[in-house]
Amino acid sequence: MPAVVDLRSDTVTLPTPGMRKAMARAKVGDSRRGEDPSVRALEEYCAGLFGKEGGLFVPSGTMGNLCAACAWTRPGEMIVASSASHIAGRESPAVSLLASVAIIGIDAPGGIFTAEDVAAAVAPAPARNESRVGLVTAENTHNAGGGTVFPLAALKRIRSFCGKTRIPLHIDGSRIFNASVASGTPPAAYGKVSDSLMFCLSKGLGAPVGSILVGTRGFLSEARGVALRIGGGMRQAGIVAAGGLYALKHNVPRLAEDHGNAAALAEGLDGIPGVEVVNAPVETNIVLFRWETPSLDLPAFRERLADRRVLLDDRAFPLFRAVTHLGIGKREIARAMRAFREVFVGGAVRP
Ligand SMILES: Cc1ncc(COP(=O)(O)O)c(C=O)c1O
């Protein structure tokens, strides 16, 4: 039986043999005491990549953003973010609970907002004696926007506005290396335009666990305190940190292949009658597409696709998300396309 073509997310990757070897060899210690050499090596490497004073290895992107939100804001303040961003959606209950802040959402095409949008979101507070905005976050690439790249020029203008109004800018860079590879922007340029930045090792980079928060020593000392208070203190975490370091050293340039495969998928989908690619032209590794006149309901659709051993993110049926990653090559794209043609073109039957 052929392997499953899993396009649900770039979080489904499995560690490669080389990565597993690096993990098995990792020198470890009690990371909570600052004694794990592999964690320290990873944090230092990441700080260097982004031109920041330090890094903090945390178990997940959610925890990285939460630590940043708690470290930068005071209770009663507000955070400005794209309304479709991960922090304004899935993470907002925990951010509201633990940082005691509200999130003001900006509606922007593809999740890419401007300095003027931020100014408009920040302006009413002093005039109406409302809560102060304590943090702006920009998601790069923007997941729900379809893997859109936040242009560096837009980030620079936002940072300049934030600097004048003394509001820190945090980048949720879960997929920052996709942005970097797609736009040819070095990671340090993103580090330069932000006060803090979080990125995930366990998405396109293909490591099994973890995210990194980079910033100044002062910010990281606050963020580390938050991570420890919410149970993010890890012990011999060097085993997974070594997977992260391996991913950074081996899996960054290959993200261009994921982008090429996503573009090929989008082109193929666009040729299927009744299917519309929503985020054309696809910028990175995420394809959003809609089945305009579904002839199956969700359970039947899932069954037909699963029969053909293809998985998609179908939570917003009939809008779908397909994400390419290191488990997806040209062969898998061809298999997925065959399954899509059979299922989306009316009258698909079980094979
Ligand atoms: C843009 C963005 N931010 C944050 C996260 C949260 O990362 P994690 O799943 O590691 O908690 C995700 C996860 O998909 C994401 O897409």
Image (cartoon, helix red, strand yellow):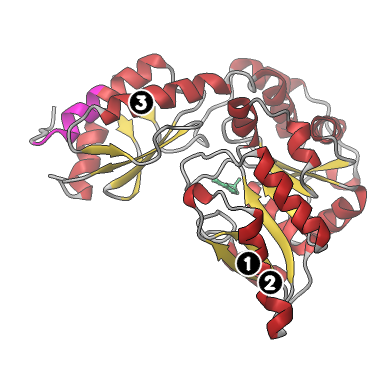
Q: Look at the image and tell me whether residue 11 can be seen.
A: yes
Report how far apart the C-alphas of labels 3 and 2 lie in the structure: 42 Å
Q: Assign the magenta stretch its main secondary structure.
A: helix
Secondary structure state at the residue bearing disc 1 = helix
Pick the front one: 265 or 281: 281
The amino acid at mark 3 is Leu
Secondary structure state at the residue bearing disc 3 = helix
Where is residue 20? Give x, y as percent: 65, 21
Question: Please, is residue 332 above or below residue 286 in the view?
Answer: above
Residue drawn at point x = 52 percent, y = 37 percent: 11
Where is residue 71? Give x, y as percent: 80, 61
Q: In what quadrant of the picture does the N terminus appear? A: top left
Question: Please, is residue 244 above or below residue 249 in the view?
Answer: below
Q: Number of callouts in the render?
A: 3
Tag of residue 120: 1
Report the magenta residues as a range.
Answer: 338-346
Q: Which residue is denoted by mark 2 in the rendering? A: 123
Q: Look at the image and tell me whether residue 2 can be seen.
A: no
The amino acid at mark 1 is Ala
Where is residue 92? Give x, y as percent: 58, 64
Residue furthest to the left in view is 347
The amino acid at mark 2 is Ala
Tell whether 176 sits left or right of 273.
right
Q: Which residue is denoted by mark 3 in the rendering? A: 265
Queried whether the magenta region covers residue 342, the answer comes back as: yes
Question: Please, is residue 136 above or below residue 59 in the view?
Answer: below
Residue drawn at point x = 82 percent, y = 60 percent: 164
Pick the front one: 50 or 340: 50
Residue drawn at point x = 21 percent, y = 45 percent: 292
Residue furthest to the front in view is 116
Queried whether the magenta region covers residue 57, the answer comes back as: no
Pick the front one: 245 or 113: 113
